[in-house]
Every structure is written in structure tokens, then in C-alpha cells.
Image (cartoon, rainbow, N blue to C red):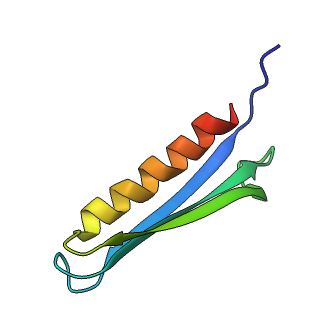
Amino acid sequence: MTYHHRIILEFDGASRHNPSGLARCGFVLYEMDSHGAKSDMIDEGNDYLGYNISNNQAEYQGLINGLRCIAEKR
């Protein structure tokens, strides 16, 4: 049997002194209610990415980590 869940993925990333500083990223997964709004939080995560990471790279890593979390829950 296949279950269909509507999920909202929010993600972000940042680099201090872009692109040569410290960088982090994170994500949060929410259930979507029948009106398309955020409901219960499903999961969250964050990563320290190190030095020499741009803001864009940090953003993309937050997206990738969120998508991996969704894939693991399937």
C-alpha cells in the first residue's frame, strides 16, 4: 500500500565572510494540513560545513540534506 504525505521542506544555509568563512546549513520538515499550511514538525537537521564554503553552497547543502531525510522516511 502506498501512502501519500504532503510535506513542506524549509532549508537555509549561510557563510560568514562569504565565501571564505565558516558555513552551516539546516532544514525542517513539516506535515502539510488540508489547507496547505504547516502542521506538525516531522524532522529537522543541521550541519557544520567548514571553511571556504559559499552562501550558495551552504543553501544547496541544506536542500540536499532535507531531500535525503525525506527519502530515508519513504
Quarter of the picture holding the C terminus: top right
Query: Residue reaching furthest front?
Result: 50
Q: Is residue 63 left or right of residue 33?
A: left
Q: Is residue 33 left or right of residue 70?
A: right
Quarter of the picture holding the N terminus: top right
Toward which corner of the image does residue 15 lie, by quadrant? Answer: bottom left
Q: Is residue 62 above or below residue 8?
A: below
Q: Is residue 31 left or right of residue 27?
A: right
Q: Is residue 17 above or below residue 48?
A: below
Q: Is residue 20 left or right of residue 27?
A: left
In this view of the protein, which residue sits in the foreground, 27 or 48?
48
Give the residue displayed 43% in from the left and 48% down from the top: 64
Image position, residue 24 (x, y; %): 40, 73
Query: Residue reaching furthest top?
Result: 1
Give the residue displayed 53% in from the left and 67% down from the top: 46
In this view of the protein, which residue sits in the foreground, 37 or 24?
24
Give the residue displayed 59% in from the left and 62% down from the top: 45
Image position, residue 57 (x, y; %): 27, 60
